[in-house]
Amino acid sequence: MKKVLLASTALALTAGMAAAEVSLSGYAEIGVAQVDNGDGTQDDLGFHSDIDVTFTLSGETDGGLQFGATIDLDEVGDDATTTTGGLVTGGADPIASDGNPGGATEEHSVFVKGDFGTITMGDTDGAFDWAMTEVWWGSAIADDHTAHAGASGNNELDGSYDGQVARYDYSFGDFAFALSAELDDTGTGDTALGAGIKYSMDLGGTSLGFGVGYQDNGTSDIAGISVDAAFAGGLGARVNYSTGDFDGTAGDDDHMAIGLSYTSGPLLVEANYGEFDRNGTTTDGWGAAVNYDLGGGAVAMVGYGTDDTTDRFSAGLGLSF
């Protein structure tokens, strides 16, 4: 998910013996951003502001079945407009449902949960993305550290059709697994099917997490593995690798990425590198971010990302409510 909501306000609605909870949380950004495409365009700093509002609904039946829903409204600011190279260039519908969007969205999902596991449907991760861990930490107001040409969010095959994903996941102890499907509502394409496994372990102060996933939509497929390590002293390391035919063109595709982080009290520093090899054509890039938690839901953020064609930079505050 793009933003991490660090604080929320809640309204409790009670009727009879059953209780439902509606939580309202918000996230806002303020700062400056710059994108340099190397051709003399969009080189100047621009102001950046953005507001997200998220509603989280939850409840439970008399028999213990839990259920809930979330809706994320990106209504105001840079995310509510179309962009070129990362800066605003025109308008767009501020509430437009889209499974794998390039502009403003109304993200939503619904879940039911019980002893049998959890079923989630809507704008949610497929099983491959669910199992894999991205190699970056923290945030930047323009996501510069995750926008370079070598970055992958592990969601290449999510949004193959209308973006409405159904996922079942179940956990027991340190293990968890998931299955997912995305249907082609036109009836012409194969169902996009996914499977993923996660395992975590603690080795005397070093935490390790492993993820393995696979997804196939009939014309493209992807398989991958990720490792996430958290060491004593605030050091972190992540690596992932994926392969298949996931760009929709003939030929093999590969992606590898590595990230390192250091956390000390309110300070987080991270750097990541990624590389795609699409049928022999290589693109890569790296990014970095520095976050400092000011307390009360405010985080000072600096982000940077670069590749062969574009340099990105932003600085500002992320504000959680």
Image (spheres, rainbow, N blue to C red):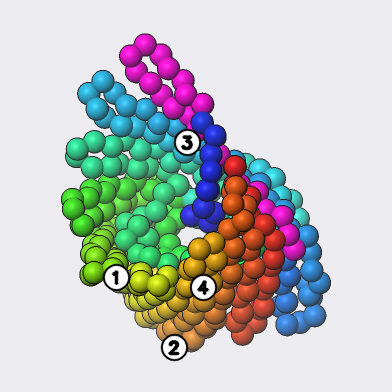
The mark nearer the N terminus, 2 or 3, is: 3
- Which of pointers 4 and 1 lies earlier in the amino acid sequence? 1
Residue range (magenta)? 11-32
Helix, strand or loop at mark 2: loop
Judged by depth in the image, the label closer to the viewer, 4 or 1, is 1
Magenta: main secondary structure equals strand
From the image, state whether disc 2 or disc 3 is nearer to you: 3
Pair 1/2: label in front = 1
List the residue tagged with mark 2: 280
Tell me: 271 left or right of 245.
right
Q: Which residue is mark 1?
A: 206
Above-or-below relation of 195 to 260: above
**Dot 2, crowdedness within 10 Å: few (<14), some or many (≥20)?**
few
Residue 33 percent location from the top left of the image: 72, 66
Q: Is residue 67 above or below residue 98?
A: above
User: What is the C-alpha distance between the residues marked 4 and 3?
Assistant: 30 Å
Distance CA(mark 3)–CA(mark 1): 33 Å
Q: Is residue 228 left or right of residue 35?
A: left
Front position in the image: 283 or 261: 261
**Residue 255 location, x and y as percent?**
41, 78
Q: Nearer the viewer, mark 4 or mark 3?
A: 4
